[in-house]
């Protein structure tokens, strides 16, 4: 009988290290590891050697950085997608791409199943499995963490120790870390208690704001149709630009997030994130949009941003709705070209200048000096027409929403008190 062949999404971390051996033991399977290079740094060190040492039947390490930046990060950035108004979703954006290449390798290697290391109460299980459902609906998905015997990371570490397997996680520092070029997520250990300030060793790529330089750093970010293309006048590839801004902003204490968020499965979790480039680019792009988008479009795009963020977070990347969102955003962002200069200082972002050839800002209309060309006389008629429905309603129905205004007993008592003094 031929062995089952399973393609495993393999990071080389604690969970997927244990999973590789566990699949061999419990499924009598040949395991092919699939690792995507999304710009992570520490995770890729020694991952190929580790996969071979663990007995993988095949090892794939794929450079996905450019595709990740162009096809996943930039669409999310242009849409303004920040989950619950804060999180740029580095992990959530990486999962559909990893699911895509996992499905491709499974086809190539004639696998009957794919496996991932996501937990039963996390979001990533949904993201992986929704991606596989869309791209390889006939392939079985195995999630060992949902069915195996281990109840804690400490038990996984002990499992590795019994088999002579070296892992980076320790009982003293049991963080679960996921990293790519768009950000780092850190959980587990002391971070599970929201009363505890994150230990200094939890952070991987940013300087503590209080330890950042005492002199501010300025960076000019140039955008074309909503996509960043240059820093300080130097044209860079998407990957180069993100990596350069990660280093620059991270050194100035930019990018730390400590969030209690609502997971897809219905629980709240405390997560620590680092996203220096992501937060800086989102900030700068919003400022350029203020200059170039009309009010109605800007306000409607903000609504789309909320829905787009939920879509990404909830693992629905490979859906018609996301394609429709992208079409809308692509059209809206056509005039969003220009540059924004941002000051980075001890964890804070401040705008220094904005410019666009498509700016809707007109000094002669905005100014309160002798440059003013606004037709003030026209405002009287506008104000009367604008207020007419409110005035008509009030005449017919009386005052609305003004319980303490003129004519109310509270107001009369207040007036009497003033007169007595």
Image (cartoon, rainbow, N blue to C red):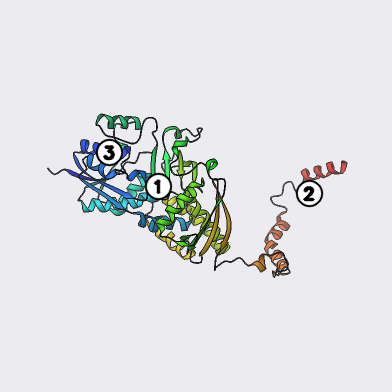
The x, y position of residue 404, in whole percent, is 74, 46
The x, y position of residue 396, in whole percent, is 71, 57
Residue 178 shown left or right of residue 286 in the figure: left
Of all residues, the one furthest to the right in this rendering is 420
Q: Nearer the viewer, residue 99 or 39?
A: 39
Q: Earlier in the sequence, mark 2 or mark 1?
A: 1
Give the residue pinned by disc 2. Answer: 407
Of all residues, the one furthest to the left in this rendering is 1
| Quadrant that contains the N terminus | top left
Q: Residue at x 38, y 33 (%)?
A: 174
Snapshot quadrant of residue 18:
top left
The x, y position of residue 79, in whole percent, is 47, 57
Residue 126 shown left or right of residue 6 in the figure: right
Q: Residue at x 51, y 66 (%)?
A: 335
Residue 354 shown left or right of residue 130 in the figure: right
Report, in whole angstroms, how far the alpha carbon at label 3 lies from the one at label 2: 73 Å
- Numbered mark located on residue 19 in the image: 3
For the question of whether residue 82 can be seen, the reply is: no
- Within 10 Å of disc 3 (Cα), the crowding (few <14, some 14-19, many 20+) is many
Give the residue pinned by disc 1. Answer: 91
> Could you tell me if the residues under marks 3 and 1 are in contact, i.e. CB atoms within 8 Å?
no
For the question of whether residue 362 can be seen, the reply is: yes
- Numbered mark located on residue 319 in the image: none
- Within 10 Å of disc 2 (Cα), the crowding (few <14, some 14-19, many 20+) is few
């Amino acid at each position: 009988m031929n062995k089952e062949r399973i393609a495993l999404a393999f990071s080389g971390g604690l969970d997927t290290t244990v999973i590789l051996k566990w699949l061999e033991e419990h499924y009598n399977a040949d395991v092919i590891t699939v690792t995507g290079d999304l710009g992570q740094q520490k995770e890729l060190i020694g991952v190929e050697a580790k996969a071979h040492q663990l007995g993988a039947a095949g090892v794939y390490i794929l450079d996905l950085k450019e595709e990740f930046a162009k096809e996943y990060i930039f669409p999310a950035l242009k849409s303004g997608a920040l989950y619950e108004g804060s999180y740029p979703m580095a992990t959530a954006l990486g999962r559909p791409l990893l699911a895509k290449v996992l499905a491709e390798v499974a086809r190539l290697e004639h696998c009957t199943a794919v496996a991932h290391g996501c937990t039963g109460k996390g979001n990533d299980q949904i993201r992986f499995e929704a991606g596989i459902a869309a791209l390889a609906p006939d392939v079985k998905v195995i999630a060992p963490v949902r069915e195996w015997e281990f109840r804690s990371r400490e038990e996984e570490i002990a499992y590795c120790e019994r088999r002579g397997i070296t892992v980076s996680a320790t009982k003293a520092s049991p963080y679960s870390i996921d990293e790519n070029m768009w950000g780092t997520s850190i959980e587990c250990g002391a971070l599970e208690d929201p009363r505890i300030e994150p230990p200094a060793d939890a952070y991987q790529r940013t300087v503590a704001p209080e330890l950042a330089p005492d002199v501010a750093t300025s960076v000019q970010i140039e955008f074309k149709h909503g996509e960043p293309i240059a820093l300080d006048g130097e044209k860079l590839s998407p990957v180069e630009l993100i990596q350069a801004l990660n280093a620059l902003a991270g050194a100035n204490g930019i990018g730390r997030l400590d969030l209690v968020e609502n997971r897809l499965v219905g629980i709240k979790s405390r997560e620590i994130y680092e996203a220096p480039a992501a937060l800086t680019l989102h900030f700068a792009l919003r400022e350029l949009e203020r200059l170039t988008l009309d009010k109605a479009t800007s306000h409607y795009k903000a609504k789309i941003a909320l829905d787009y963020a939920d879509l990404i977070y909830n693992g629905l990347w490979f859906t018609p709705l996301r394609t429709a969102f992208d079409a809308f955003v692509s059209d809206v962002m056509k005039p969003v070209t220009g540059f924004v200069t941002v000051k980075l200082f001890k964890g804070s972002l401040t705008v220094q200048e904005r410019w666009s050839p498509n700016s809707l800002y007109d000094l002669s209309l905005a100014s309160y000096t002798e440059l003013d060309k606004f037709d003030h006389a026209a405002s009287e008629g506008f104000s009367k027409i604008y207020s007419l429905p409110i005035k008509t309603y009030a005449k017919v129905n009386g005052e609305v929403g003004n319980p303490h205004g003129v004519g109310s007993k509270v107001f009369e008592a207040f007036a009497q008190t003033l007169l007595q003094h």
